[in-house]
Structures are given as structure tokens and as C-alpha cells.
Image (tube, grey):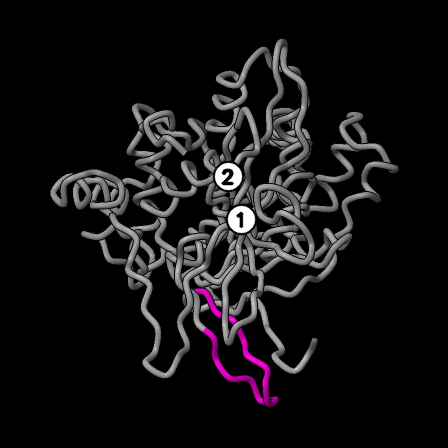
């Protein structure tokens, strides 16, 4: 994501919240966000003494006392619901609490308020029942990445690229793309890596630009990720639930942002940039016990290198260079991996079966060959 397009206020808030996380490397964050250490520590001090809202020209906290009459409080519930039509009573309750309101009705009472004023229908309410999913124990252990289905603009199409941290549901990247090419994804991932660091693993599906076909799910984009030291895993064919958290994020994106038509990509991106901080820092998440994604996220200590690291293998590995169309030779026979590795070295390692070798590119196993087969 080109960070200059994100509002200065959103970037400041994001920096401060992540910098105030326990164990955060403040000077490293200053480097990633492009600010001096003096400025970074000034923002942190201001947030600690006056709240994160003090970073803006005007505070977002309520101008009136949290102790409201029932009528005024009911009006505030409806106003917040109108601002976020996809939020249910539990999210509204949590957000109002975060804004400083102390004497609040229960979520069930808020739900009744929404029903009474026609903000919720019974059929829609039944669609939003939460269910449990597996999650990784730490931030950046796994990112899920995918394109949301494209939609029409006045004279083009928008392909939203989304990247989500599995543990925290923190949205790493949300960009309105003109296409789904690997070079487009690499550009936006590079910007995300510079700010948030490198994850241990990224999960993708089997379509372009992540894979070229089911028996060879490797493309130049995937090869680039592997060279960065990132493990890449592909979902099982026809099982989109493997990327369930990112799929669920797409539903939220559709419900809260993509409810109107847009003339062009710039217009879409402006809406994305306004909504993304709300999702990460304000919107309570059902799967996180009504915490925000930012409350569970911290940046990765693994830096994005300015230059790709050299490809090195163990002295015991059998190294071969991949030729045109993804072929390599060993013991007078020709084998194929993927043309994404053309011109690059791969390593053969003995498997536990005689005559069988595992084929590695950097740290990742990409294939297996059997010399005993004809």
C-alpha cells in the first residue's frame, strides 16, 4: 500500500498503538513509519498523557458527560449504528464503553433498541452467529492473503487485495487494484513488509497469481516470497474455508464499505483508507472476545531486506540449476518443477526411501523425484 495515501492521523494512531505494545521496539517502528525518534516519542508521550485522540486536531471522545439520560443514550446507540450499519449490539456496546460511556444498557437491551427502531431484522440477525475457528498463537505466525471478488466501476474493475494476520485479525493490506497480476501484489506486499516486517508463513489459494496449476502451485511471486524466508502454503482445491478468516473479512468489507457504487479506483481507495483504521482500532471483533484486532497485534521483528538474500544450501545438498520451462537434470534424466524457478538453484536431498529425493527451493520443499520409476 502506498502509505502516503493513508491519512496522517491514521498513520499516527497506528504508530502509537503499536509502539505502546509491550516489548515494542520504538526506534525500529520509527524507522518503518519514516519518523524521527524524537517525533515518535513525542507522539507516544502525548497519547499516554492525553489519550490517542490527542494526536488529532480534535478529540473523538464525547463532548458531553458519559452519564446520559436514557433518551440521549438511546439516540447515541442509534447514531453509532447508523455510522456502522453492519455492527450488532455487542460491538456497539463495546465501542461505546471504549468511548467513555460508563452506565450503558446491556447488549440485549441495545439489541431491543435497534429492533424497535427498525435497524435490525430477525432474518439478518440470524446470519451473524459466531462460531469458533483455529487461530495461531502469535501475531505474524501466519498471514492470509487473497483477492476479494472484483466489482465494476464506471469504466473499469476493482480487485481488492486483502492481507489479514491470522492471530489478531489485524488487516495488514487493503488495496484497490486494477488487476490481479503478481507484479501488482508484489508492489503492495513490499510496502506492507517495510512497515510490518515479514511473517513466518503466508497462506494463499491456488488461483492466479499464487499458482499456475494444481500440480505446480508456484509462480514468480511465490518464488520471491520463499526467497524472503517466508513459507508459502496453498489451500486445498475447492476449500475456501482454509482462508476462512480472510473470507470472513471480505464479508465485513462488503457489508461496511462496498454498499455503494464507486466511479474509479481512487474513490475506492479513499473509502478503504478511511475504514481500515476503524476496523483495526475501533471495531470490536466477535472472535476476539470483543477486543479490537490492534489490541492483539504487534509488528514482526523480521525486517524486509533491501536486497534479496543469496540462495545458499548445505554442503551435503545436491544442487542443480533450473533451466528453461522449469526443467533440471540429474543422473542423465530430466525432471520438471516450475518455470517460476528458471535460472535459480534448487537442492536435492535424500528422502527416507532409496532412490527418492526431496526437491527444495531455499527452505521450502517444492517437489519430489523418484529415480526408480520409469
Report, in whole angstroms, how far the alpha carbon at label 1 lies from the one at label 2: 8 Å
Residue 169, visible in the rendered structure:
no
Residue 47, position as x, y percentages in the image: 28, 42
What secondary structure do most residues of the magenta stretch adopt? strand
What residue is shown at x 35% (from left), y 73% (from top)? 313
Q: Are marks 1 and 2 in contact (CB under 8 Å)?
A: yes
Quadrant in which the C terminus is drawn: bottom right
Q: Is residue 116 left or right of residue 261?
A: right
Asked which secondary structure carries label 2, the reply is helix
Asked which secondary structure carries label 1, the reply is loop
Which residue has dot 2 on it? 182
Residue 322, position as x, y percentages in the image: 46, 59
Quadrant in which the N terminus is drawn: top left
Q: Is residue 291 magenta?
A: no
The span shown in magenta is: 348-361
Residue 197, position as x, y percentages in the image: 35, 53
- Residue 349 vs 49, above or below: the answer is below
Q: Quadrant of residue 311?
A: bottom left
Which residue has dot 1 on it? 219
Q: Quadrant of residue 150?
A: top right
Amino acid at each position: 500500500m502506498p502509505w502516503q495515501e493513508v491519512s496522517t492521523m491514521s498513520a499516527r494512531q497506528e504508530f502509537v498503538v503499536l509502539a505502546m505494545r509491550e516489548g515494542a521496539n520504538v526506534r525500529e517502528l520509527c524507522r518503518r513509519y519514516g519518523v524521527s525518534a524524537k517525533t515518535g516519542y513525542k507522539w507516544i508521550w502525548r497519547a499516554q498523557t492525553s489519550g490517542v485522540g490527542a494526536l488529532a486536531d480534535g478529540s473523538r471522545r464525547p463532548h458531553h458527560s458519559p452519564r446520559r439520560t436514557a433518551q440521549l443514550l438511546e439516540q447515541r446507540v442509534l447514531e453509532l449504528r447508523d455510522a456502522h450499519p453492519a455492527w450488532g449490539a455487542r460491538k456497539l456496546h463495546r465501542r461505546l464503553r471504549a468511548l467513555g460511556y460508563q452506565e450503558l444498557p446491556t447488549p440485549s437491551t441495545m439489541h431491543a433498541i435497534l429492533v424497535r427502531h427498525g435497524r435490525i431484522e430477525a432474518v439478518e440477525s440470524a446470519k451473524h452467529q459466531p462460531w469458533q475457528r483455529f487461530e495461531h498463537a502469535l501475531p505474524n505466525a501466519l498471514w492470509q492473503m487473497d483477492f476479494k471478488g472484483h466489482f465494476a466501476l464506471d469504466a473499469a474493475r476493482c480487485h481488492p487485495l486483502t492481507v489479514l494476520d491470522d492471530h489478531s485479525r489485524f488487516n495488514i493490506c487493503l488495496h484497490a487494484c486494477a488487476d490481479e497480476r503478481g507484479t501488482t501484489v508484489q508492489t503492495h506486499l513490499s510496502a506492507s513488509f517495510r512497515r510490518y516486517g515479514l511473517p513466518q508463513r503466508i497462506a494463499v489459494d491456488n488461483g492466479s497469481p499464487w499458482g499456475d496449476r494444481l500440480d505446480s502451485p508456484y509462480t514468480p511471486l511465490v518464488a520471491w516470497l520463499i526467497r524472503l524466508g517466508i513459507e508459502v502454503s496453498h489451500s486445498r482445491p475447492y476449500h475456501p474455508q482454509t482462508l476462512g478468516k480472510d473470507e470472513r473479512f471480505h464479508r465485513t468489507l462488503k457489508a461496511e464499505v462496498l454498499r455503494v457504487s464507486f466511479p474509479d479506483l481512487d474513490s475506492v481507495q479513499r473509502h478503504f483508507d478511511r475504514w481500515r483504521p476503524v476496523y483495526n482500532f475501533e471495531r470490536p471483533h466477535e472472535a476476539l472476545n470483543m477486543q479490537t484486532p490492534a489490541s492483539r497485534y504487534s509488528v514482526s521483528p523480521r525486517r524486509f531486506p533491501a536486497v534479496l538474500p543469496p540462495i545458499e544450501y548445505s554442503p551435503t545438498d545436491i544442487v542443480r540449476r533450473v533451466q528453461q520451462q522449469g526443467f533440471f537434470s540429474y543422473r542423465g534424466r530430466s525432471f520438471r518443477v516450475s518455470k517460476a524457478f528458471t535460472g535459480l538453484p534448487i537442492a536435492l536431498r535424500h528422502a527416507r526411501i532409496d532412490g527418492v529425493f526431496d526437491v527444495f527451493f531455499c527452505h521450502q520443499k517444492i517437489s519430489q523425484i523418484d529415480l526408480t520409476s520409469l
